[in-house]
Amino acid sequence: MVVTIIGAQIAVPGVAWGWGLGLLLVGYALRNGSKELSGAAITAACITFGYRMYSVLGDYIKEWLADDMGLAVGVSRLSLIAFILPMAIFSRVQKSKPRYIAVGSWSNPIYFPWIMRGLYKEPIWRFILIFTAVTGVVFAFIIDWGRPGLIALTGYALLFASVNAVLEELLWRGYILSRLTEDFGEIRGLVIAGVAFGFYHLHLGFPWIVCLLFSFFGMMMSGVAIRAQGLVPVIAMHFVMNMWFVLSGMIL
């Protein structure tokens, strides 16, 4: 899964499409044998096809809105719909409802020191508030609050975070995490989805070490989705981080 998301970003399009087709054929060849490996291969194929369509559509939107880069980056996140499409089709063909495509509970517990288990627990809503406060303090020292155009940048941040948080969570936690936890269990599914999510950010220009850090963040968000049994709390968490990233200049 991790090799697939990295390969889809760095391989030439023809190789990526060929890899995806090969994974699809392997997945269907294994459907009467190993259900888990079959599902993983088809999921990886869907990720490959979805990424390539998302990449082409995103580049087209950015070119179309090239005169306003902030608007282009925000609107181009709508191309994630193309990324989601193959996973949605696979889910429909399987006639299985993704387990985390639901509102989710704000009151379910989050455990410390690990989200899935630990000696201390807090309700999810309080965990999100603590997360927002801690990250806010960290980014307060990074954001240039006196920079020209801060109001406009805040508008771009709201656009980017609103679109990106919803669609990325629908993809990574709604469809991909649901599929992987169904095939491999919660812990292994959480780790695989989290690491793949982290290295998916290579195409946005982040270096490998930052993508590794995003992998830990992806595992954390996967844990929140599992504990909440839904997406709204983790969308809120993702929205907060996207706001900080744009305001700090890490994205725009």
Image (tube, rainbow, N blue to C red):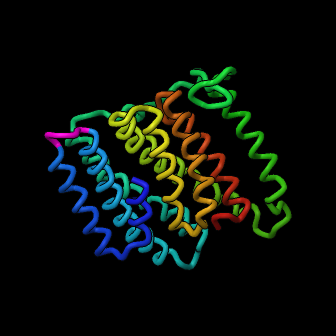
Residue 185 lies in the magenta stretch: no
119 is higher (above) or lower (below) than 94? above
Q: Determine which quarter of the picture holds residue 134.
A: top right
The percent position of residue 239, horizontal first and vertical second, equals 61, 47
The number of callouts visible is 0
67 or 15: nearer the eye? 15
Residue name at image x 67 percent, y 23 percent: 122
Q: Main secondary structure of the magenta part?
A: loop
The percent position of residue 96, horizontal first and vertical second, equals 26, 34
47 is higher (above) or lower (below) than 225? below
Residue name at image x 44 percent, y 73 percent: 59
Q: Determine which quarter of the picture holds residue 127.
A: top right
Which quadrant would the C terminus be assigned to in this image? bottom right
Q: Is residue 127 left or right of residue 36?
A: right
Q: Which residues are magenta?
A: 31-35
Q: Is residue 82 visible?
A: no
Residue 33 lies in the magenta stretch: yes
Residue name at image x 37 percent, y 36 percent: 184
